[in-house]
């Protein structure tokens, strides 16, 4: 589903290379995790894939179901089925969470040539999804992420994911700032969305999220490249020994 | 425009003034004398530094083409209201509803001014005079001396249907000078709506006396004619525990200056003045100026100024807002917010927020900002599949929201929101 081929990225404003040849393939139905030390380029990868400004792709590319992702506007990538759960969800005062979600759902439907969802159907749909994530009606009425706790913001990300039904989900450090209960709630939300047609790329610092969202493949990213890939046991190895051993073995600088 | 245009005279002779009965004659003579003392505004005046008065004081107005609404229904059309129509500043009885309503007395200024005695004499030119200090407002004095039409409205009870003044603009060279006198009696309530361009050049003064425990709500949608010019003044005096709320929406217009001067005279009064102005220089020149002066002269009064401007393609915005707290006005709660959203590098915004406080137990603050669309928020919305232009509109409406929230009537607020949304949709890109 997602294919990343020799991706090189630098910051637009300064001559700083961040990704130095990332190769990655995430097939439909699978969950891949990317782990790595700070500054390894994990978040940059998620931003570049979702189309944030400020980065220059100098070499390589990425496709979603064969379509060139990097050529599309952020909204086109979303309509094509890409979703990024933000590490730091943005607060938007003045825009109601409900208005935001309805606009997003209908914009994607329109972009795909589908009929817009009626207000009544939308309400039924969002209430059901919100209930699963223990998001109360009050949170839906409030402005997007304004005054939300860390856990509420992350649950709101998963609610958006559930509403938009993307095929390729990228979770950027979704576990950061979550306590154990919130982590379970968020993970359950993600697991409920797992199916044959959908793929996940879970970016995380720690192994603990992967106890809840079990990955098929774990990649270690360092110095702007994927330096090692393996099964879930690779995450455990990191948990026990840190990144130093792996990096030394691979002879890369963090 | 030709800058050598002749100016209107600062000294208005008695024969040049409208024919009046005894009380109005006196009020107009006084106003003419005030104007002669103050002189017409010039760019050297501090309060006219950012808005050129030249075209407002020219002997004749610059012509303004009529806006083509293309069949769009006029603003407030769905609101149940008492409609009173003026065409180029002249009352049109045929197009208006009966000037009556429960708890309401409405008369035409042109009729009232020819009588020898009328209660309006206690307000006409009186609140305007009070508002001339410490800052001179010569164009308001000019209006008092020369106004030819307008309404004298008295609310004696809680009036549920808004009184809606509709200002039609039909003559491309019209120069309208209108003056309203409004008294809201003790415990009474009135909602006033105003909409339309009124004229190529429109001068309007409203003097509003809100008695103890009374409520006055005002929502105004200024005309969309691109070349129109307007100088408006609202002078309000608030009694104890009274409420005054005024909101103005401005989209388009070559030049608009809205002055609001409020004197809080009774304890526990509330005054909120808000505005949303949207200007796109691609339609023609756009210059919008909000000038507000609120005087706290009683205990425990609350005042709010919430002004938002969205500007692009060379559109210009000005805000001059002042809160003056007199020595005895303890427990004053005053807040002033003036923000502009500049959608490109050509737009500009100038703000002069001022606080002058002589009491020691007060909460007063102001915030003035000017910035671009929040790129983080924009990316977040787009990453959820919302196209760039719709995401931008959502953020602009969100920016305007706290000004619109100042409109108490939710049906009217929704109508204003819809109009702003429609304007944004027409001005994308």
Image (tube, coloured by chain):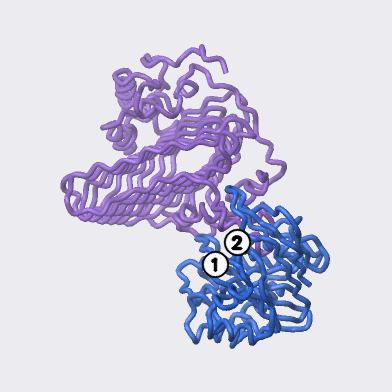
**In which quadrant of the rendered view does residue B378 lie?**
bottom right
How far across and how far down the image is residue B3, in percent?
Answer: 52, 15
Check whether the beta carbons of the residues at disc 2 and disc 1 lie within 8 A of each other.
yes
Residue indicated by mark 2: B380
Which chain did the image draw in blue? A
Q: Same chain for marks 2 and 1?
A: no
Residue A63 picture quarter: bottom right
Q: In this rendering, is residue B326 above or below A154?
A: above
Secondary structure of the residue carrying numbered label 1: loop
Q: How many marks?
A: 2
Q: Residue at x 27, y 35 (%)?
A: B130
Q: Is residue B39 above or below residue A165?
A: above
- Residue at figure coordinates x 39%, y 27% from the top left: B48
Observer-nearest residue: B292 or B129? B292
Q: Colour of chain B?
A: purple
Q: Position of residue B252 (x, y in %)?
A: 58, 37
- Crowding at dot 2, Cα within 10 Å, few <14 / some 14-19 / many 20+, comes out as many
Residue B341 visible to the viewer: yes
Question: Chain ID for label 2?
Answer: B
Viewer-nearest residue: B195 or B44: B44
Query: Which residue lies at the image location 45% right of the left edge and 58% below the top edge?
Result: B408
Q: Position of residue B326 (x, y in %)?
A: 20, 44
**Residue B235 image position (x, y, % from top left):** 35, 39
Provide the residue designation for mark 1. Answer: A89
Which quarter of the figure has residue B153? top left
Q: Quadrant of the N terminus of chain B?
A: top right
Q: Is residue B365 left or right of residue B153?
A: left
Separation of disc 2 and disc 1 at Cα?
8 Å
Of residue B111 and residue A138, the one placed in the foreground of this image is: A138
The residue located at (76%, 70%) in the rendering is A2
The quarter in which the C terminus of chain B is drawn is: top right
Q: Is residue B93 shown to the viewer in this render?
A: no
């Amino acid at each position: 589903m997602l294919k990343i081929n020799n991706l090189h990225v630098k910051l637009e404003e300064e001559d700083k290379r961040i990704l130095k040849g990332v190769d990655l393939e995430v097939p439909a139905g699978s969950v891949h995790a990317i782990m790595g030390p700070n500054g390894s380029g994990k978040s940059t990868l998620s931003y570049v894939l979702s189309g944030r400004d400020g980065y220059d792709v100098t070499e390589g590319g990425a496709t979603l179901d064969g379509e060139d992702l990097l050529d599309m506007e952020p909204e086109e990538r979303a309509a094509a089925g890409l979703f990024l759960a933000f590490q730091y969800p943005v607060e938007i005062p003045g825009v109601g969470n409900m208005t935001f979600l309805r606009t997003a759902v209908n914009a994607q439907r329109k972009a795909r040539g589908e009929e817009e969802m009626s207000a009544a159907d939308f309400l039924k749909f969002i209430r059901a999804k919100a209930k699963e994530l223990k998001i109360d009606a009050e949170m839906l009425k409030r402005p997007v992420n304004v005054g939300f706790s860390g856990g509420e913001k992350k649950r709101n990300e998963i609610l958006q994911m559930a509403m938009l039904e993307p095929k390729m989900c990228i979770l950027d450090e979704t576990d950061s700032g979550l306590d154990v209960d919130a982590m379970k709630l968020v993970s359950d939300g993600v697991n409920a969305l797992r199916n044959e047609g959908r793929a996940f790329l879970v970016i995380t610092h720690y192994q603990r999220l992967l106890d809840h969202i079990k990955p098929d493949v774990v990649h270690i990213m360092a110095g702007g490249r994927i330096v090692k890939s393996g099964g879930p046991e690779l995450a455990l190895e990191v948990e026990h020994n840190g990144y130093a051993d792996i990096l030394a073995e691979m002879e890369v600088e963090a | 425009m030709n800058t050598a245009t002749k100016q209107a005279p600062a000294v208005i002779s008695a024969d040049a003034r409208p024919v009046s009965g005894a009380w109005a004659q006196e009020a107009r003579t006084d106003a003419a004398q005030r104007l002669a003392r103050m002189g017409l505004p010039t760019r050297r005046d501090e309060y006219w530094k950012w808005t050129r008065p030249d075209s407002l004081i020219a002997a004749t107005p610059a012509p303004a083409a009529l806006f083509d609404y293309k069949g769009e229904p006029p603003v407030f059309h769905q609101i149940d209201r008492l409609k009173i129509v003026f065409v180029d500043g002249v009352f049109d009885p045929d197009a208006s509803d009966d000037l009556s309503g429960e708890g309401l007395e409405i008369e035409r200024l042109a009729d009232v001014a020819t009588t020898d005695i009328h209660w309006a004499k206690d307000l006409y030119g009186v609140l305007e005079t009070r508002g001339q200090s410490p800052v001179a407002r010569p164009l308001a004095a000019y209006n008092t001396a020369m106004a030819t039409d307008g309404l004298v409205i008295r609310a004696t009870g809680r009036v549920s249907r808004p009184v809606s003044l509709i200002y039609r603009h039909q003559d491309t060279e019209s120069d309208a000078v209108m003056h309203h006198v409004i008294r809201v009696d003790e415990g009474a309530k009135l909602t006033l709506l105003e909409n339309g361009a009124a004229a190529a050049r429109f001068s309007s003064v409203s003097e509003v006396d809100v008695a103890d425990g009374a409520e006055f709500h005002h929502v105004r949608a200024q005309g969309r004619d691109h070349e129109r010019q307007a100088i408006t003044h609202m002078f309000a005096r608030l009694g104890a525990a009274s409420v005054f709320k005024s909101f103005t929406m401005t989209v388009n217009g070559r030049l608009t200056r809205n002055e609001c001067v409020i004197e809080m005279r009774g304890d526990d009064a509330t005054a909120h003045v808000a505005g949303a102005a949207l200007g796109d220089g691609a339609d023609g020149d756009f210059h919008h100026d909000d000038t507000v002066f609120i005087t706290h002269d009683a205990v425990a009064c609350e005042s709010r100024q919430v002004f938002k401007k969205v500007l692009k393609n060379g559109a210009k915005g000005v805000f001059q807002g002042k809160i003056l707290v007199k020595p005895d006005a303890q427990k004053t709660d005053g807040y002033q917010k003036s923000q502009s959203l500049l959608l490109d590098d050509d737009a500009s915004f100038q703000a002069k927020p001022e606080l002058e406080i002589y009491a020691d137990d007060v909460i007063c603050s102001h915030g003035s900002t000017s910035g671009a669309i929040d790129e983080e928020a924009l990316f977040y919305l787009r990453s959820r599949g919302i196209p760039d232009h719709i995401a931008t509109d959502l953020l602009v409406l969100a920016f305007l929201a706290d000004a619109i929230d100042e409109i108490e009537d939710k049906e009217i607020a929704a109508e204003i929101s819809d109009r702003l949304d429609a304007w944004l949709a027409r001005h994308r890109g």
